Image (cartoon, helix red, strand yellow):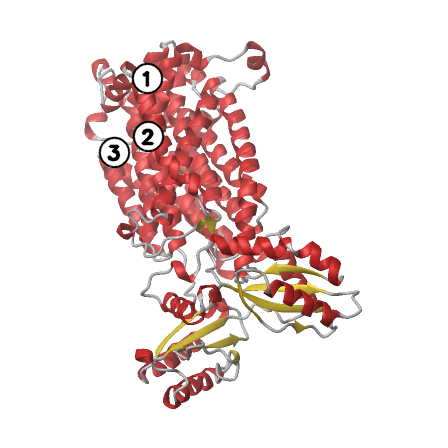
Amino acid sequence: MATFLYRVGRLAFRRRWYVALVWAAVLAAVGLGALKAPGAADEGFSMPGIESQKAFDLMEERFPGATADGATARVVFVAPNGQKVTAADHKKAVEDTVAGLADGSQVASAVNPFQAKAVSKDGTTAYATVTYKVAADDLTDASKEQLEHALQEARDTGLTVDAGGSAMADGGGAGGTAELIGVAIAAVVLLVTFGSLAAAGLPLLTALIGVGVSMATILALSDALGLSTTTGTLAMMLGLAVGIDYALFVVSRYREERANGRAPQEATALAVGTAGSAVVFAGLTVVIALAGLAVVGIPMLTKMGLAAAGAVVVAVLIALTLVPAFLGFWPNAVLRRKDRGPRRAEEEAKDNGGTRWARFVLRRPLPVLILGVVGLGALALPMTSLQLGMPGDEAKPTSTTERRAYDALAEGFGPGFNGPLTVVVDAKGDDDAKAAAATISKDIGATKGIVSVSPARFNEAGDTAVFSVVPSTAPTDEKTKDLVTAIRGERPGIESETGATYEVTGTTALNIDISEKVQSALVPYLIVVVGLAIVLLLVVFRSLLVPLKAALGFLLSVLASLGAVVVVFQEGHGAALLGVETTGPIMSLMPIFLVGIVFGLAMDYEVFLLSRMREAYVHGETSHQAVTSGFRHSARVVVAAALIMIAVFAGFIGESDSMIKMIGFGLASAVLLDAFVVRMAIVPAVLALLGDRAWWLPTWLDRILPRVDVEGEALTRGADSPETAPAEQEAARV
């Protein structure tokens, strides 16, 4: 591996113009494809195999066209100072507003609340449902402006008016601000680490090129592969983070080789052969973790994982080819002035912060290990009370009209009104479908925790009925989950009584089913991903205990980061500091995101740090000396890489969307804990306690495993060959 990558780096340095032109051509080609590609329609969220999805599919089959994904807006009117919306002047204002909304070119219908009996019992609140002919993403600016104008006109009459629903979506997601903040902080970290503008700028430039290629490819293939507009969010986030990190490690090793007296071409080849080997295997662990998201069984999540894995592959290829090509263009610009000459032996052996920290841990391995494990364990404890769900409008800031509409409906109609359940009755083959539906509706309505049941609506064939059930509790309340379980538990008895069957769906039931499926998929996902990564690390480090230690350390960090998320976003401690106004259940996909993404990134640091230790150990140093050597060469760069990752992820905490904020916080805290507690403290402490046993591998397993020279042993034997030095020096002058 190291020899092959050495040749790749050498070739990229020598043929730098060709390499640069090839990447420019690739970027131009995929960019042109992205511009010409038709925008892919968002297919929506689906999860095969759960009851909510089956019920929705049945509705689409039996009520063709009725479940079309048209945008909706629920406009809520509240009378001022305890007055009633049924008063003549307020009623006229509401009716005029609804009539104005119905005139929109994209509006299918606007229901008058007084005709639909959509007025609260105390008469203070009413709501009107506006249904559009097109999906939310296809609403024109004119339609959105008409809605906003109608709301404002109603407010001018003295009513409090707000609106929720898909028509109010602003296409959220992470915009450019988060990425800019992350890039800016990354630039500062790189400048401090390298002390050179060119050395700091090169990883940023190559990472941005990689993200450009990845995102353009995703857009170009979006129609053919059915990728939605949200698929690329994870790819952009990870592509930027690992792109900077991988280039950082190659450039750092290049500077080290140059400071040791290597000529530019030889230093580049050695950097790609050694640090590049670590990049390849670190990238493979990330790809395994992301591709493993397919185990969960959520199509959208699978596409996001594969798209992000593709972005990581691009980042690896750029680190192995474009970075050495750029080093060929500017071989001396990335160096500090003091490093542009040969380094003296005493300077090579000089202690730095990494060696001093390593020696501190090596002298006190047991206290450091206990402190690290106990600290992470304490942070992980709140995870035992983890509640999963899919936060909706209730999680948005009170400054948004969606949140105010949600609160007004909850106050006027009860907390369960914002999350009604939909019951689909399948009476096909039943002699009296209407009687069966009436019996089911009556029995479900008698269930404790039900406030109201709407009249059943039948399809044209008369064999399928749909009705809504309003719980007494909020959509994210645990009692609502228990209610859904109770309704489904009554099914066998009701089915035997009526001969018809039913299923429960709706947004609330869907979110409950998603949470349960994600929880059940987490253990298999962990087994697949961690198992494959352990095998990969076995091959890389030829050690039995090192991969096991890496996996256990990761589990500690990810559990601790989940605990931190629970503390802030569920229990509310410190939530105000992050701009979180409402706490509640943790997003259902959060554990999967953390496990998948953080595992890959954690293995990055493990591979980069341990590969230098393994390299020193293979070249004759004792186990303790190898730990010190590994920290001398890698600690500064690993710290810089972790700070860059944290900066990129923490930038998303500033977004207004609570789910993006949660993901940014979770990933940033996980990287912080994994890099600085697990990899920089627990890992050297464990290695110190294990000694030579850390690198032990059974003889039979040693024979089976393929050999990959990730330490660059073959390169070290030939790197000092005197015959090549003059030629390399001559190449450097050219």
Q: Assess disc 3: are there few (<14), some (14-19) or many (≥20) residues with their C-alpha within 10 Å of its C-alpha.
A: some
Total marks shown come to 3
Q: Nearer the viewer, residue 591 or 671?
A: 591
Question: In the rendering, at what x and y percent does residue 267 appear?
Answer: 35, 25
Sequence-wise first label, 1 or 2: 1
Q: Are circles 2 and 3 on residues that touch, CB within 8 Å?
A: no
Q: Which residue is mark 3?
A: 193
Q: Assess disc 1: are there few (<14), some (14-19) or many (≥20) residues with their C-alpha within 10 Å of its C-alpha.
A: some
Q: Secondary structure at mark 1?
A: helix
Identified by mark 2, the residue type is Gly
Q: Which residue is mark 2?
A: 375
Q: Which residue is mark 1?
A: 366
Identified by mark 3, the residue type is Thr
Asked whether, in this view, residue 180 is left or right of residue 125, the answer is left
Q: CA distance from mark 1 to mark 3?
A: 31 Å
Q: Residue at x 56, y 52 (%)?
A: 513
From the image, which quarter does the C terminus lie in?
Answer: top left
- Above or below, 218 against 721 in this view is below
Q: Residue at x 38, y 82 (%)?
A: 84
Asked whether, in this view, residue 84 is left or right of residue 293, the answer is left
